[in-house]
Amino acid sequence: MVSFRTPAPGTAPAPGTILVELSLRVSSDRSSRPAWARHPFTRALVIDLRYAPPVSRPLLLSFLLAAGCAGSEPAPSTGALAEPADEPGATRASREAAMTDEPADRAATAPRPAPPAEARPPLTVHPIDIDEAEDGRGAVVSGVDAIAFDLDARRFPPRAADPVLLLGPLRFTRYTHPRPGVLRFVADRAALRDGVEVAVQYGDDASTRVVVRDALELP
């Protein structure tokens, strides 16, 4: 350690000189060290700056100041992580709970769960104002009283074959997606009858047939 001290009265160094005190302290286990290193010692040196070049004097002073700061001994380490200061009335359980709690800002920025899927009926039948509609026999007629059959598209995902709406013996193959999740067929009211079975299948594959409603009720 390098330290600076004020000389005793009558022992001040000459002007332009600095009195430097050098101290050696051994803070670790001294049992394994030689006898000369088991006890601290101090030596005083006088550095005469009058013979140093003017340019090097600030550098020399900076070096001596840095050596004096570096000589301070750090606090002994116990090898364990420091624990936060206990609050009045704090217990071990409360300290552990405080260490495991998430910060408020992290909880505020946590992603919100996705909203539940919209509940949608498997089939909705309603009148629709449109110029053309299928008659269920392979023809498209115009100027008709049209009925829309809106199906829940999630129940009928895309496949190699297109979906087909079956109303009793009638087949409807033209469909649209008026909005996401909706599969719509449009039929001519004149061709429809109450009480027929409503089903959907893919193409001509009867094994994919799904009954949507046992008996049709026209609005």
Image (cartoon, rainbow, N blue to C red):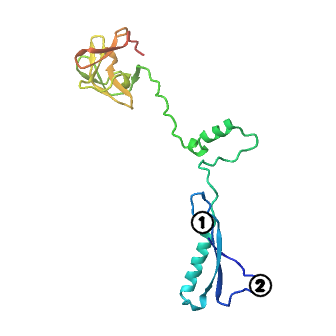
Q: CA distance from mark 2 to mark 1?
A: 32 Å
Q: Which residue is mark 2?
A: 9
Figure quadrant of residue 198: top left
Give 91 or 217, whichever is nearer the viewer.
91
Give 9 or 102, whichever is nearer the viewer.
9
What SS does tag 2 mark?
A: loop
Give 90 or 34, whichever is nearer the viewer.
34
Residue lying at 34% horizontally and 17% vertically, measured from the top left = 189
Q: Which residue is mark 1?
A: 37
Residue lying at 66% horizontally and 47% vertically, measured from the top left = 84
User: Number of labelled discs?
Assistant: 2
Q: Which mark sits nearer the N-terminus, 2 or 1?
A: 2
Q: Position of residue 37 (x, y in %)?
A: 59, 66
* Residue type highlighted by circle 1: Ala
Circle number at residue 198: none
* Residue type highlighted by circle 2: Pro
Q: Position of residue 52 (x, y in %)?
A: 56, 89
Furthest-front residue in this view: 35
Residue lying at 37% horizontally and 31% vertically, measured from the top left = 178
